[in-house]
Amino acid sequence: MIRLLGKTNNLSQCLQLKNQNIVRAVGLIKTTLEDIQEIRQNGWDGLFKEVTDFCVKYNILVPNMEDTRTANGRSRSWGGQLVTYNHHFKIEIFNVLHDQLIVELNNRFAERSTQLLRCIACLDPKNSFANYNEDKLVDLANMYAADFSTYEVTFVLRNQLDSFIREARGDPHLMNCNDLGHLAMNMVKSDMHTTFPLVYRLVELALILPVATATVERAFSAMSIIKTGLRNKMGDDWMNHRMVCYIERDVFVSIEESKIIERFQGYRTRKGVLPRPTRKYSHFASIVNHFCLLYYVLIRISKF
């Protein structure tokens, strides 16, 4: 289990990032499936030797692999089928566990979803758009039929892609981009989003995809924590303020309490003065104090 979780850890961590690297995610999906399949085909002998050495070292009885036992799901008293211990551990446990993981990954990353990621990877600006593929980008536009008309996909998009890739590979600002976010910003700065509107629309759709996965799941998880049964009458505005503080807590922790107090105190004349934060705090106490202060400020702001 540790080995299997280690093989899937990089993919899991990549998919949970807010700023997902689509190209890396596509590569990790394929690499993870290949690694698991390789372990299933050739990993049994190494694992068996390692377990045997461990058992010998700590005086643990190792069964004879040629002895028989009842197959899983069968009763010995009802004439259950007998299998060897080697068959039980290798076929019924080792292979079945890997097959379940492979099936789970194939179900979560179906061919349609994986094809979508592969098409988006063609927009990656690294190494002078080394992954560029015009046909796959046209396929990407066909997947978003509501955003591209048949005329745009058939006659306009290909011409814009050809012109855009020549311009981008000669533009030093676009050649230095490392991800789709910087590509979109530099296209706007150089006014290329108006010259190649369909290409810019593809970039926008590619940027929306990561937001529709891990970030949205985090938002819904935060909603269940913030809007509980005791606070079920919370309004949308107040809940939005609290969710921003909860989801972007890494940003808010970096803000000093004194700056928050000064900004809030300067909104309008206050009858009272907020207390100054003390300097000596542990790390946990500082975070707790920070969120309590934000909570108080948002309450006061909502009243005005």
Image (cartoon, rainbow, N blue to C red):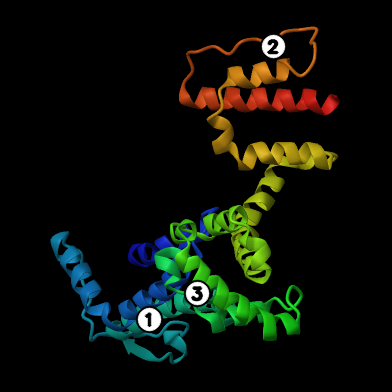
Residue at the spot of label 3: 105
**Does residue 157 appear in this view?**
yes
Horizontal side, residue 135 vs residue 282: left or right: right
Q: Nearer the viewer, residue 304 or 144?
A: 144
- Quarter of the N terminus within the rendering: bottom left
Mark before the other along the chain sequence, 3 or 2: 3
Q: CA distance from mark 3 to mark 2?
A: 53 Å
Q: Nearer the viewer, residue 5 or 251?
A: 251
Q: Nearer the viewer, mark 1 or mark 2?
A: 2
**Does residue 230 appear in this view?**
no
Residue at the spot of label 2: 274
Residue at the spot of label 1: 95
Q: Residue at x 22, y 79 (%)?
A: 45
- Secondary structure at numbered mark 3: helix
Q: Nearer the viewer, residue 63 or 249?
A: 249
Q: Residue at x 25, y 85 (%)?
A: 67
Hey, which quadrant is residue 69 in on the image? bottom left
Amino acid type, callout 3: Leu
Mark before the other along the chain sequence, 1 or 2: 1
Q: Nearer the viewer, residue 206 or 198?
A: 198
Q: Position of residue 249 (x, y in %)?
A: 58, 37
Horizontal side, residue 62 vs residue 246: left or right: left
